[in-house]
Image (cartoon, helix red, strand yellow):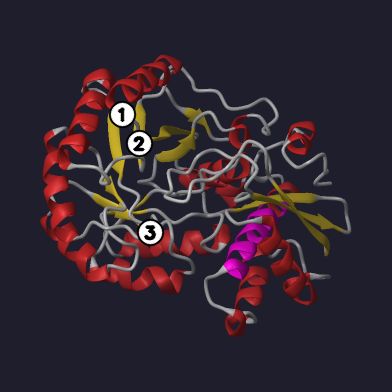
Amino acid sequence: MKIREIRALGLRSATPEGGWSNELRPDDCVHTLIAVLTDEGLVGLGSVFTNDNLVKAALAVLEPLYRGENALEPERVSEKLRQNMFWLGRGGSIEHAISGIDIALWDILGQATGQPVGRLLGGRYRDRARPYASILMDEPEPLAEYLLRLKAQGFRAFKMGWGPFGRVSDDKDEAIVAAAREVVGDEVLLMVDAGGSDAYWRNGYKWALRTAEMLADYDIYWFEEPLKPDALDDYVMLRRNAPLPISGGEVLTRRQAFQPWLQAGAFDIVQPDVTKCGGISEERRIAWMAQENGVRFVPHGWNTAVGVAADLQLVSAFPDTDLVEYLTGSPYVDEIAAGGWQLDDEGLLLIPDKPGLGLTLDMDAVARYANGERLF
């Protein structure tokens, strides 16, 4: 089975806020879907956390390397693309595009073998995962109201990020966290994401340690991205001294970039994003490396329905990974998935056991967010 064509389609008109200093607008494109078409009719789905213009440019560069390749060998093909692109940049937009291709090739392999991707990765440890509702920080009162609505929908884990946190005052930070903990109660998981990869993040180690101590008082499950994404030494110190788990790694790409962080002990929890770190093949290697260094693996491919589907398959294949990030209220997650996503009575998501990613896209919904264009 050969790769005949690879298509990319950017999602627009409903792009959610990112919490960034230079805020996203609804028509901005930061999420791109990938379709790998084969000569035998099977089509694999992928997703890339990158603007579609960058993805299409990367595909044009990569085309001589992937056209006619075996569509049933995702790990070898994606590594071939990576090895031949070192001279055009290591870990940038081309690696992001390779991520989407790799996800789609695993989807094809699963369809061709009649197996879910998680089983092809070595076996399924679970058939359900706990989604944590991923939301932006807000002022205490509107945040509390939103959390109550999500709890009523069945969520039993929440992550609040970005917004005013770490950007106004320590008092504001604590007021936000106190209000959130009060409304969700003590029985649910509550995580905080400072968003230290924001442009010109101003807070350093001392702020992060002081804030970590405050968060521990509210039983925060982990503290995510409290420092600039290149502050390796500060992350190592923070992990050693903070009274709660420290997480990060979503901006890193390629296993080689993760290695020094994992070996140095910079994280308690590492969060590679399957839609940019190199795909399922590369994320599996990163997760193995995390295990070998005593670091917990929680995936971060939350940004589209395809990213969630890939994350669920990865979650199924690792014994100590049972959480998946879920961006609430995004049409790119909820509307483009045929049938949508439903929580069960315990607030868990079923991990599909259908062949491949187990995901069917609603192509009419996709077209609505792609200026009427069709992916295939």
Judge left or right: residue 228 versus residue 14.
left
The quarter of the image holding the N terminus is bottom right
**Location of residue 209 in the rendering, given as x and y in whole percent from the top left corner:** 14, 53
Q: Secondary structure at mark 1?
A: loop
Mark 1, residue position: 139
**Location of residue 203 in the rendering, given as x and y in whole percent from the top left corner:** 23, 56
**Location of residue 368 in the rendering, given as x and y in whole percent from the top left corner:** 76, 34
- Give the residue type at disc 1: Glu
Looking at the image, can residue 129 be seen?
yes
Q: Is residue 84 above or below residue 18?
A: below
Q: Are marks 2 and 3 in contact (CB under 8 Å)?
A: no
Q: Secondary structure at mark 3?
A: loop
Question: Which residue corresponds to the image point at 71% horizontal and 45% vertical from the top-left?
Answer: 114
Judge left or right: residue 84 versus residue 175.
right
Q: Is residue 236 above or below residue 370?
A: below
Question: Which residue corresponds to the image point at 65% horizontal and 43% vertical from the top-left?
Answer: 27
Q: Is residue 171 above or below residue 223?
A: above
Mark 2, residue position: 159
- Give the residue type at disc 3: Gly
Q: Secondary structure at mark 2?
A: strand
Which of the marked residues, 3 or 1, is nearer the chain's N terminus? 1
Which of the marked residues, 1 or 2, is nearer the chain's N terminus? 1
Question: Which residue corresponds to the image point at 24% horizontal and 31% vertical from the top-left?
Answer: 176
Mark 3 or 1: the one toward you: 1
| Label 1 environment density (alpha carbons within 10 Å; few <14, some 14–19, many ≥20) | some
Q: Which residues are magenta?
A: 93-108
Which quadrant would residue 240 be assigned to in this image?
A: bottom left
Looking at the image, can residue 126 be seen?
no
Mark 3, residue position: 249
Q: Is residue 214 above or below residue 101?
A: above
